[in-house]
Amino acid sequence: MESSPHILVVDDHRDIRDLLARYLAKHEFRVSTAEDAAAARRVIKDAAIDLVVLDIMMPGEDGLALCRHLRATGDLPVILLTAMGEETDRVVGLEIGADDYITKPFNPRELLARIKAVLRRAHSMPPRFEAVGEGRVRFGRWVLDLDRRELIDEDGVAIPLSTGEFRLLAIFLERPATVLSREQLLDLTRGRDAAPFDRSVDNQVSRLRRKIERDPKSPELIKTVWGAGYTFVGEVERS
Amino acid sequence: MESSPHILVVDDHRDIRDLLARYLAKHEFRVSTAEDAAAARRVIKDAAIDLVVLDIMMPGEDGLALCRHLRATGDLPVILLTAMGEETDRVVGLEIGADDYITKPFNPRELLARIKAVLRRAHSMPPRFEAVGEGRVRFGRWVLDLDRRELIDEDGVAIPLSTGEFRLLAIFLERPATVLSREQLLDLTRGRDAAPFDRSVDNQVSRLRRKIERDPKSPELIKTVWGAGYTFVGEVERS
DNA sequence: AAAAAATTGTAACAGATTGTACCAGCAAGC
DNA sequence: GCTTGCTGGTACAATCTGTTACAATTTTTT
């Protein structure tokens, strides 16, 4: 690793900020702290932050909202701190697309281990391409024509895609082998937030599967990750 | 475990100290007691304490202050004892970063379970599961395709796995011939902590066995290690 | 050895999550 | 206007997961 990673700790409790700042500094990290989402945004703008440790329960802007924002704008790794409650932690954390999460009360040593793991993962991320260009992308037995926005099968027959289907597929192809939550997909394809019982992503996935999967009942390309979202599986090759 | 862990019980009630000392000693722990924060500090200084059980309501220096001190100076695990219905204290306790808490009146057995859990967490954290690995893994008469997230039998027939089953199996295959406790498996597969009487891992193992074992009644691949957890037995070959 | 306690296997159930058919609203094109 | 294709909401069935309960098994105690 080039220089020591810069961690931003966002929590409204001074105790925790101080504790983590001291502990992480002792372990060769540079540390900044912020007591709310607004301050966090300022810090992220000014300093080169490598990873954010973020409490989801904060007054003012919610930690989840901030996490969602970070996900949407870039790929700054986030580790969520959640209170001891049961379901919300895991599900919400994963859905939002945090890289990891840890429940309070936590052992600082464990948090340290996870920070290292996430950084390791983040640094060795396979290169992603921007499908929003021109050219063609081959995957499975298909070729996606990015200019014409249509699918071409093995026999060279073109299958039209709707705007929504095309966007969704492009998003998946940009991030193969990555689990994307419904929140993320909605944000990336429509740029909007989810309504309480929003199933539009499921519907769009279902429609896309009907076009690209041999058997939509047991999909081979777009897999469901229960409780988390969807993931595109398989080779993706620019051509 | 190398030698029996040394627990320090800090409480101003003699009956509680004695009860816990007797109970924990019966379960292979070494136990020291202290009746206030000052005494506790002395003990911690002199003896190699592995974990502190700490009442937050004490005359003199507050238990919270001591907890905060312990957190700041090192990473000695702490389990807080709180009186029933002291919501504020509980919350603050968690924020301070105690490893766990338990409300009085409590069941000694439950405290024991939490002590074990905290110690296990503190001592050895196995490497975290990498969500999507690559390639295929052969074991027994099966091949697990890590990219496609599915199981393939000898005839090349794919057997679908649920997300939970896939994660569990992948965890086992990454650590063959290693005994994994239910705590570890729960953390590795769902990233969550165990509830007091959590049997979800047993159920998931049972469901997985039903799919991969010739005879689930006498499993050949995933063996039960009584009183400890489960272990995957057999050749695992990356391919 | 018998009894009690702890641990495990798993069926059954309930709640959560997902797949998708169907429908209505809407925009674009006629 | 009318038609057509796309999209999101709704509803219901299917699937997945955690909890509970109880029987079976193993260990410990009496």
Image (tube, coloured by chain):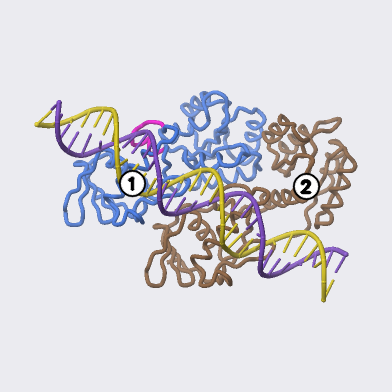
Chain colours: A blue, B brown, C yellow, D purple
Specify the amino acid type for callout 2. Asn
Residue A200, position in %: x, y? 36, 38
Quadrant placement of the N terminus of chain B: bottom right
Q: Is residue B220 magenta?
A: no
Q: Is residue A41 left or right of residue A9?
A: left
Residue under the point 58% across and 26% down:
A35
Is label 2 in a helix, a strand or a loop?
Answer: loop
Q: Is residue A2 visible to us here?
A: no
Label 2, on which residue?
B107
Most common SS among magenta residues: helix
Residue under the point 20% across and 48% down:
A159
Q: Is residue A15 left or right of residue B38?
A: left
User: Gap between marks 1 and 2, in whole Å?
Assistant: 50 Å
Hey, which residue is sitting farthest right in the picture? Answer: B14
Specify the amino acid type for callout 1. Ser
Residue A52, position in %: x, y? 52, 35
Is label 1 in a helix, a strand or a loop?
Answer: helix
Q: Which one is nearer the viewer's eye here, B149 or A51?
A: B149
Q: Crowdedness of circle 1 by 10 Å Cα count: few (<14), some, many (20+)?
A: some
Residue under the point 78% across and 47% down:
B107
Q: Residue B6, which numbered label? A: none
Q: Is residue B31 left or right of residue C12?
A: right
Label 1, on which residue?
A206
Q: Is residue A192 magenta?
A: yes
Circle 2 marks a residue in which chain?
Answer: B
Circle 1 marks a residue in which chain?
Answer: A
The range drawn in magenta is A184-193
